């Protein structure tokens, strides 16, 4: 008898988010069926049908239980020393405030007036840099997450990114620190779970690539 089993990736994040204190476990949404005569030609159709049904069930759960999580109280520019918050120990966050040796969480800051680019000939002001950042944030939706501007100041921007199906929310911050260098610090973190399938890293990379088209650059490889 042949048996085909498929797992739905969203179920993994759902479990880790609803039970954060327990070790992550992978639950598979299983569809095992074989025809009486041993013919396996219908199995691919069965798997696709099962995935569609399970996806619909997850969407219904998301409508009933919104998995946005609680907004952290420590968001914003920290006072001592002035910086964005560090990441938790979980692997679902990146921040420019981390030590460069922390490969799981560190990300290099951006420069909106790089010296090997427009910084020499046509540097822009901090206000113009913020406007460029806003344009990119509003137009970039990596992995289908929808951005929502929560707070905007002259040197600080806070954005919530919501997932398209389950309503998971990630908090993303950008800070233009004082000084002569045209740097931008940032932090991107998931509210729930213990790992994010590199969604936060992918988001930061997508934003950086679009900002590079406007003349920005990264201070180091990432």
Image (cartoon, grey):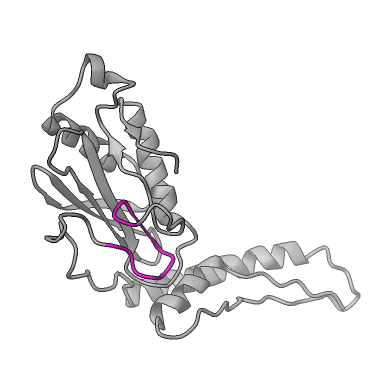
Instruction: Point out residue 41 in the picture as x, y percentages from the top left corner.
Output: 83, 63
Q: Quadrant of the C terminus?
A: top left
Does the segment drawn in magenta span residue 95?
A: yes
Q: Which residue of the protein is positioned furthest toward the left in this rendering?
A: 154
State which quadrant residue 37 falls in. Answer: bottom right
Left or right: residue 117 versus residue 51 is left
Q: Which residue occupies the foreground of this view, 148 or 61?
A: 148
Q: Which residue of the protein is positioned furthest toward the top in this rendering?
A: 121
Q: Which residue of the protein is positioned furthest toward the right in this rendering?
A: 37
Q: Which residue occupies the foreground of this view, 100 or 46?
A: 100
> Start and end of the magenta stretch?
86-98
Seen in the picture, residue 122 relative to 66 is either above or below; the reply is above
**Residue at 55% over, 80% down:** 25
Does the segment drawn in magenta span residue 139?
A: no
Q: Tell me how many marks there are.
A: 0
Give the dominant element type of the magenta stretch: helix, strand or loop: loop
Q: Which residue occupies the foreground of this view, 131 or 84?
A: 84
Residue 143 visible in image = no
Seen in the picture, residue 215 relative to 53 is either above or below; the reply is above
Seen in the picture, residue 205 relative to 121 is either above or below; the reply is below
**Residue at 42% over, 51% down:** 201
Instruction: Point out residue 71 in the picture as x, y percentages from the top left corner.
Output: 22, 69
Left or right: residue 43 versus residue 6 is right
Residue 222 visible in image = yes
**Residue at 24% over, 61% down:** 85
Instruction: Point out residue 90 in the picture as x, y percentages from the top left corner.
Output: 41, 70
Left or right: residue 130 versus residue 3 is left
Instruction: Point out residue 104 in the picture as x, y percentages from the top left corner.
Output: 45, 59
Q: Quadrant of the N terminus?
A: bottom right
**Residue at 31% over, 43% down:** 109
């Amino acid at each position: 008898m042949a048996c085909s089993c498929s797992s739905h990736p969203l179920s993994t994040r759902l479990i880790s988010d609803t039970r954060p204190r327990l070790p992550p476990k992978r639950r598979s949404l299983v569809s095992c069926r074989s025809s009486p005569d041993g013919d396996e030609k219908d199995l691919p159709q069965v798997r696709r049908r099962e995935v569609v049904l399970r996806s619909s069930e997850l969407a219904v759960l998301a409508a009933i239980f919104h998995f946005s999580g609680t907004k952290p109280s420590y968001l914003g520019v920290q006072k001592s020393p002035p910086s964005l918050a560090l990441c938790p120990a979980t692997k679902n966050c990146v921040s420019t405030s981390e030590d460069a040796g922390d490969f799981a969480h560190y990300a290099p800051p951006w420069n909106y007036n790089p010296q090997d680019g427009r910084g020499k000939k046509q540097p822009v002001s901090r206000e113009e840099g913020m406007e460029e950042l806003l344009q990119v944030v509003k137009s970039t939706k990596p992995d289908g997450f929808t951005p929502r501007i929560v707070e905007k100041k002259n040197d600080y921007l806070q954005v919530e990114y919501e997932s398209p199906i389950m309503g998971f929310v990630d908090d993303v911050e950008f800070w233009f620190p004082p000084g002569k260098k045209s740097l931008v610090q940032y932090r991107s973190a998931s509210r729930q779970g213990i790992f994010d399938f590199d969604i936060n890293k992918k988001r930061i990379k997508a934003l950086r690539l679009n900002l590079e088209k406007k003349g920005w650059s990264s201070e180091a490889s990432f």
